[in-house]
Image (cartoon, grey):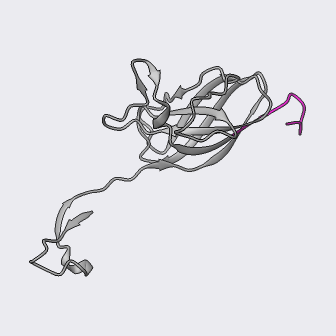
Amino acid sequence: RMCWCGLGQASCRESGDFSTIVGRLLVGGMNSSTNYCVFSLPCTIVLKGANLGQEDAVLVLLSGETCGLSSFLAQQVTFNPAVTADTNQTANKTFELGPVLGMRTFKVCYCINFGNKACKADGNPVYSRYTLTAGTLEIWGPFTGYA
């Protein structure tokens, strides 16, 4: 709940002074995680969180890049950025990245598509909206234990 205190009616210093309910604050976001895929095979990542949106998206960058500041997409990822097909889920989002053709560790960035803050504009990704680090994506080779 969000509560309000009118200065002059109370000191607005104690929690009891905020007696007028003015709304509800809904907070959402994903839990950072490490995802694993096999080189050249279709890669699916699942992110978990709270109040995740219908049109949220992920962007895969090289591990040294910064989410929200970089437009250097990992070219080795087939579908980048990727949108979710889990439109009714708010706690889990699945993203199909297609085959990944690079054996390395990547950074996964998350975009919350909310209100007028879309992940895309005119069909192109808005890189500055992918500000949340959702974790890493590790691509392993075709042999067990080889990365």
Question: Is residue 145 on the magenta stretch?
Answer: yes
Say left or right for 39 vs 33.
right
Q: Nearer the viewer, residue 69 or 53?
A: 69
Q: Up-down: is 45 above or below 19? A: above
Q: Quadrant of the C terminus?
A: top right
Q: Quadrant of the N terminus?
A: bottom left
Say left or right for 104 vs 126.
right
Q: Nearer the viewer, residue 40 or 68?
A: 68
* Residue 52 x, y percent position in the rendering: 44, 42
* Residue 66 x, y percent position in the rendering: 60, 41
What's the residue at 26%, 57% (across, down)?
Answer: 24
Q: Residue furthest left?
A: 9
Instruction: State which quadrant residue 17 falls in.
Output: bottom left
Image mark count: 0
What's the residue at 13%, 71% (across, down)?
Answer: 6
* Residue 8 x, y percent position in the rendering: 9, 77
Question: Is residue 68 on the magenta stretch?
Answer: no
Say left or right for 24 vs 107.
left
Considering the whole magenta stretch, tell me its main secondary structure: loop
Instruction: State which quadrant residue 14 falls in.
Output: bottom left
What's the residue at 48%, 32% (across, down)?
Answer: 86
Q: Which residues are magenta?
A: 137-147
Q: Up-down: is 109 above or below 80? A: below
What's the residue at 69%, 40% (across, down)?
Answer: 64
